[in-house]
Image (spheres, grey):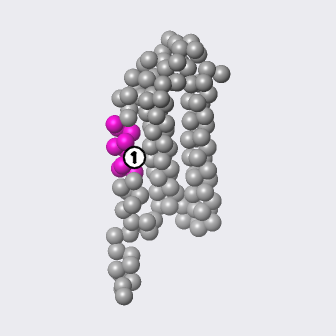
Amino acid sequence: MRTPLGRVRYLGSSHSGTSDFWRQRLTAVAMTLLIVPVIVIVLMLIGRNQAGAAQILGSLPIAIILVLFIIASVWHMKIGMQIIIEDYVHNEILKLASVMANNFFCIAVALASIYAIVKLSSGV
């Protein structure tokens, strides 16, 4: 048996507790660790034609680094926008629609980014 206070304790205004907080910190750490290799990869791409870029991006470790960076940054963006929506949008229907739009937008950004990497790495 839990009291009503026990059920809501440690939950923020979004009623999701600290899980979003820790996920956002986890993605921030992941992006911090991945930013140096991503910058090196981007610097390697400067001045290359499409065939040279395809050769660099066709490497499995480089593709993995870029995909991990995309996933971490999109997940970080999704959590941040969701927290802002939950804290500042007070109309429940608008809040639900905004959170859904945020989710769809983040998925579209991630898929488009990964598709661009795959397309460039294939040299087409």
Indicate the position of residue 7 as horizontal and vertical percent values. 38, 78
Mark 1 lies on a secondary structure that is helix
Res. 52 in view: yes
Residue drawn at the location 36% of the way across and 62% of the way down: 18
Q: Can I make out residue 84 in this image?
A: no
Which residue occupies the foreground of this view, 95 or 31? 31
Q: The C terminus is located in which quarter? A: top right
Q: Image quarter for residue 37?
A: top left
Q: Can residue 29 be found in the magenta stretch?
A: yes
Range shown magenta: 24-33
Instruction: Name the outermost residue toward the bottom.
Output: 1
Residue 11 location (% of width, % of height): 38, 69
- Who's the residue at 41% across and 58% down the image? 20
x and y, in percent, of residue 73 in the image? 46, 41
At 56% from the left edge and 36% from the top edge, which residue is drawn?
A: 114
By secondary structure, the bulk of the magenta-drawn segment is best described as helix
Q: Which amino acid, by three-letter code, is at mark 1?
A: Thr
Q: Quadrant of the N terminus?
A: bottom left
- Report which quarter residue 94 is drawn in: bottom right
Q: How many discs appear?
A: 1
Which quadrant of the view contains residue 92? bottom right
Dot 1 corresponds to which residue?
27
**Which one is in front, 50 or 79?**
50
Image coordinates of residue 10 in percent, x first then y, are 34, 70
Judging depth in this view, the residue of 71 and 51 nearest the camera is: 51
Does residue 51 belong to the magenta stretch?
no
Q: Give the class, few, some or many, for how many residues have Cα within 10 Å of label 1's Cα (few <14, many ≥20).
A: many
- Residue 48 lies left or right of residue 8; in this view the side is right
Q: Residue at x 45, y 22 (%)?
A: 42
